[in-house]
Image (tube, rainbow, N blue to C red):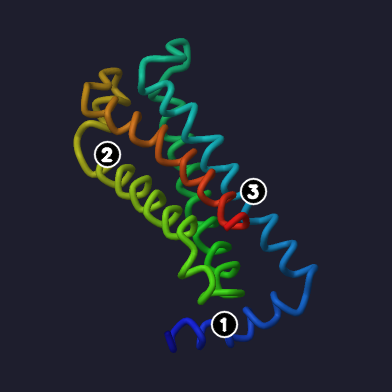
Amino acid sequence: MPVLEWLAGLPHAVALRESGTAYLLVNAAHILSVGLIVGAILPLDIRLLSGLRNVPLAAAGPLLSRTAAIGVVLAVGTGFFLFSVKPVEYAHNPAFLAKLCLLAVGILNAAWLHAGSGWSRALAGEPGPAVRLHALVSACAWPAALVAGRWIGFI
């Protein structure tokens, strides 16, 4: 795996391995990013699944969706930095691989929802069965990715 070994030798990876403070700060940023994702996505999913009916979806939906998207971008960026510290080890960790798969499910599910007309219809007040299915997949995928991420350190 020459690419992974090359990645481990990049200056940022070396700096993170050699500085407990730098690693701590990137790790904290990663945790904050994950908090943004889950903290925005779960209320949105609950609303799309017909909960929290007193919250207007037209107002909350775009805000929560954008907040989660910002969290995803930040989590992927910080996650890349954390991965680069031990890429060969992580590439063989089943929990890490599960996390990547679950992240892909969550991201592709959100992209699919936003690419179709269901999202705009939901914001107009009519979240149909397809939108509810996307919300259910999301409500399962993101917490599962969180659990898989925590599991990485225990394998």
Q: Quadrant of the N terminus?
A: bottom left
Q: Residue at x 53, y 64 (%)?
A: 77
Residue 141, percent from left and from top: 40, 40
Residue at the limit of the structure toward the top, as seen here: 54
Of the pair 22 and 149, the residue shown nearer to us: 149
Q: Residue at x 51, y 49 (%)?
A: 148
Name the residue beneath numbered marker 3. 32
- For label 1, the SS is helix
- Say the numbered circle drawn on residue 8: 1
Task: State left or right for residue 91 relative to residue 138.
Answer: right
Contact, CB < 8 Å: mark 2 with mark 3?
no
Of the pair 71 and 151, the residue shown nearer to us: 151
How far separated are the C-alphas under marks 2 and 1?
36 Å
Ranked by sequence position, the earlier of labels 2 and 3 is 3
- For label 3, the SS is helix
Displayed quadrant of residue 47? top left
- Say the numbered circle drawn on residue 56: none
Check the image and report above or below for 56 versus 30. above
Residue 118, percent from left and from top: 22, 31
Badge nearest the viewer, 2 or 1: 1
Check the image and report above or below for 89 versus 1. above
Name the residue beneath numbered marker 2. 113
Check the image and report above or below for 118 versus 20. above
Q: Quadrant of the C terminus?
A: bottom right
Task: State left or right for residue 127 relative to residue 97.
Answer: left
Displayed quadrant of residue 8? bottom right
Badge nearest the viewer, 1 or 3: 1
